[in-house]
Each structure stands twice: as structure tokens, then as C-alpha cells.
Image: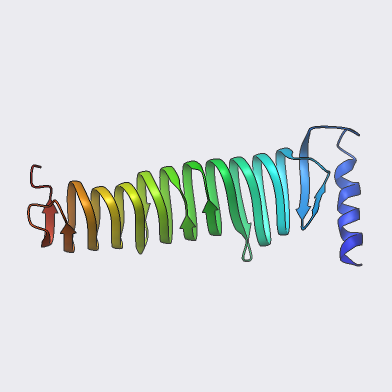
């Protein structure tokens, strides 16, 4: 059975439980250039293959062999077999992916090989965490925060402004609390470079 026939079959199955015209659907299959049923609001379950794109998902979002892209996601994003999650504006819940690529505000938990996030209130857990601000914790091998991170646990931690860093190598320009590690660098530390522990000179 060809790819087009598979898509049409899924469309027919999903449409049985949907009104003929509806702004919001309970289930959706999404792939390149196709949402079945055709809607930009999903309240329930959404499955994406290769690249699926819609505006809003409330519930459970899954991607396989590609990228699930939404503007706003509330719920759980669970992606298998090279599946990745892209959220353009707002995310709240838990996201489990090979890659979490979130461009707006996150509230909750992100777990992946790589988390590329913008503003997080919660926890990033990955081998590599890249973010602008984290009002919560980065846990990974490498943690990089362009502006602020409250808590970093990793092998190498960098944040322009840091509250607490625990790792082998800790780096910050503006230390507001404490660094614990093999080597700690803080421009405003009691000493700029110290082994084992460093803290703000007025701590």
C-alpha cells in the first residue's frame, strides 16, 4: 500500500469520531503537508511522521522518524526513533525526545540527548543542555546558559549569571552563590580561579 493510501486510510479512521466541521479534534495524524483531520487545535492525541506541524496540542504528542512542530503544547511529548520536538512559543508538561528544540517559555521537565531551550522554569536533563535562562536546574554533561541558571549539575557548567554550580569545571561571569568543583572560575569570585570551591566575594 502506497504512502498516500496509508494517509487516506488514517484520515478516514480518525474522521469517524470527528464532527464534519470542527475547530478542535481529539486525535490527529500529521505528516509533511498533511493534518488528518485538518485542524490546528488538538485536544487529545497527535501522531507525527517525518514532519508534522500544527498550532496547539493539549494532551499527548508523539513523533516518529522526524520532527513534531507546534506553537503551543500542554501535556506530554514522547518521541521515538529519531523523533524530535519543536515548540515555537509555549510549552508546559514533560518532553522526552532525541532533541527538544523549544523557542519560547517552558514550564516542566525536558529530557533528551540535547535540550536546546530558551526560557525554562523547571528541569533540563540531557547530555547537552543549551539555554538562555533556567529558573530551575540544568542536569547534564555540558550545561550552557547564555544569561542565567539557578542550578547546574554537570561535567562542565557555564552560565553568565549563576546561583549554584556543581561539576568538574564551573565557569560564570557573575556568581551569585557558590561553585563546587575541580576547577571554578568566577569573575566576581573571592578569587577568580579556585579549586574545589569558589563563592562571591561578598557572599
The total of numbered circles placed on residues is: 0
Q: Is residue 136 left or right of residue 109?
A: left
Q: Position of residue 202 (x, y in %)?
A: 8, 42
Q: Position of residue 37 (x, y in %)?
A: 83, 44
Query: From what the image shows, is residue 15 above or below residue 86?
Result: above
Q: Position of residue 22 (x, y in %)?
A: 83, 32
Q: Residue at x 60, y 49 (%)?
A: 77
Q: Residue at x 54, y 49 (%)?
A: 95
Q: Residue at x 18, y 54 (%)?
A: 179
Q: Quadrant of the N terminus?
A: bottom right
Q: In terms of depth relative to the viewer, which is nearer, 55 or 81?
A: 55
Query: From what the image shows, is residue 193 above or below residue 149?
Result: below
| Residue 19, image quadrant | top right
Q: Is residue 52 left or right of residue 123?
A: right
Q: Position of residue 115 (x, y in %)?
A: 47, 57
Q: Quadrant of the C terminus?
A: top left
Q: Residue at x 88, y 60 (%)?
A: 6
Query: From what the image shows, is residue 58 above or below residue 9?
Result: above
Amino acid at each position: 500500500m502506497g504512502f498516500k493510501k496509508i494517509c487516506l486510510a488514517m484520515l478516514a479512521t480518525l474522521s469517524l469520531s470527528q464532527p464534519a466541521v470542527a475547530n478542535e479534534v481529539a486525535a490527529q495524524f500529521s505528516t509533511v503537508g498533511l493534518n488528518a483531520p485538518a485542524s490546528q487545535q488538538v485536544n487529545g492525541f497527535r501522531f507525527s511522521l517525518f514532519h508534522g506541524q500544527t498550532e496547539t496540542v493539549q494532551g499527548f504528542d508523539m513523533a516518529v522518524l522526524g520532527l513534531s512542530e507546534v506553537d503551543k503544547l500542554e501535556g506530554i511529548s514522547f518521541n521515538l526513533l529519531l523523533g524530535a520536538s519543536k515548540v515555537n512559543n509555549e510549552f508546559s508538561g514533560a518532553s522526552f525526545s532525541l532533541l527538544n528544540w523549544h523557542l519560547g517559555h517552558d514550564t516542566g521537565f525536558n529530557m533528551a540527548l540535547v535540550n536546546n531551550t530558551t526560557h525554562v522554569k523547571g528541569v533540563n536533563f540531557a547530555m547537552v543542555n543549551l539555554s538562555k535562562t533556567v529558573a530551575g536546574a540544568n542536569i547534564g554533561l555540558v550545561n550552557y546558559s547564555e544569561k542565567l541558571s539557578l542550578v547546574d549539575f554537570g561535567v562542565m557548567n557555564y552560565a553568565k549569571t549563576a546561583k549554584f554550580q556543581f561539576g568538574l569545571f564551573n565557569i560564570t561571569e557573575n556568581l551569585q552563590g557558590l561553585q563546587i568543583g575541580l576547577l571554578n572560575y568566577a569573575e566576581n569570585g573571592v578569587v577568580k580561579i579556585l579549586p574545589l570551591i569558589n563563592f562571591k566575594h561578598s557572599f
